[in-house]
Image (spheres, rainbow, N blue to C red):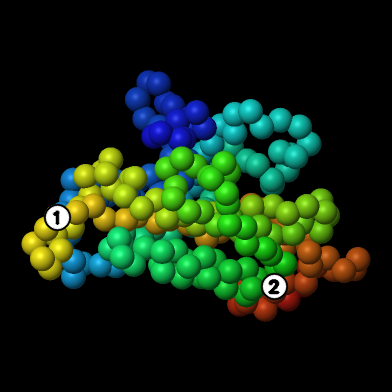
Amino acid sequence: MPDKEGQMYFVTEDQFYLIPTAEVPITNIYRNTILKESDFPQKLTAYTPCFRREAGSYGKDVRGLNRLHQFDKVEIVRIEHPDNSYKVLEEMKDYVCSLLEQLELPYRVLKLCGGDMSFASALTYDLEVFSAAQEKWLEVSSVSNFESFQSNRLKLRFKGNDGKTQLTHTLNGSALALPRIVAALLENNYNGQYIHIPKAIQHYTGFDRID
């Protein structure tokens, strides 16, 4: 846990950590694994509660649904051949964009500079939605290519068609952090009289507006 230990809750009596993101248990499914080249791609997803201490976060910007100690999140993970990982990163980023488009939310994509990325990541895109009530952009997803950083720690390898064994690449993204999405849906769809429900989720809500 090179970059998350300070944000994790530790249950001392049971010696367990509460997961900050489903990326942690999903990638560990492949610990000490050797795949075949024909096994690619490995696509995984999980819907889990996540727990974060949010240490160092104070003030008005962390109130309400902006930053919670417990929240639900859908995580997507890919185990990929090194030659294909950057193409897959673009696919994962575009997939999250398509979700935001279906939810009819104003969003933007940020390609992070080295100083803003986790040191485990080789390249990260942040996806942010605009909060009409707060008049600011809120991150709702982060999609990263870790290249071989995680697989090296996991001893996650594959045997190529040439018989040589090498490390895989791992990628992950959140799709989406649900509390902030709920806040954005409520804030951006209020017209002064009622809240419009995007067409894509009316099937699940059973109604098209909240009066």
Name the front one of labels 1 and 2.
1
The image position of residue 54, as x and y in percent, is 59, 33
Farthest left residue in view: 163
Residue 141 in view (yes/no): no
Circle 1 packing at 10 Å, graded few (<14), some (14-19), many (20+), is some
Q: Inspect the image, locate mark 2, and give the three-letter code of the amino acid beneath it.
A: Glu
Farthest right residue in view: 192
Specify which label sits upstream in the sequence, 1 or 2: 2
Q: Contact (CB < 8 A) between labels 1 and 2? A: no
Residue 8 relative to residue 28: left or right? right
The image position of residue 137, as x and y in percent, is 73, 54
The residue sitting at 67% across, 78% down in the picture is 199
Corner quadrant of residue 163: bottom left
The image position of residue 55, as x and y in percent, is 59, 29
Give the Cα separation between the discs numbered 1 and 2.
Answer: 45 Å
Which residue matches tag 2? 104
Q: Nearer the viewer, residue 96 or 148?
A: 148
Residue 33 relative to residue 115: left or right? left
The residue sitting at 41% across, 33% down in the picture is 2
Q: Under tag 1, what secondary structure?
A: strand
Q: Inspect the image, locate mark 1, and give the three-letter code of the amino acid beneath it.
A: Thr
Locate the N terminus and report the quarter of the image it occupies.
top left
Farthest top residue in view: 13
The image position of residue 148, as x and y in percent, is 31, 50
Which residue matches tag 1? 165
The residue sitting at 48% across, 67% down in the picture is 90
Q: Under tag 2, what secondary structure?
A: loop
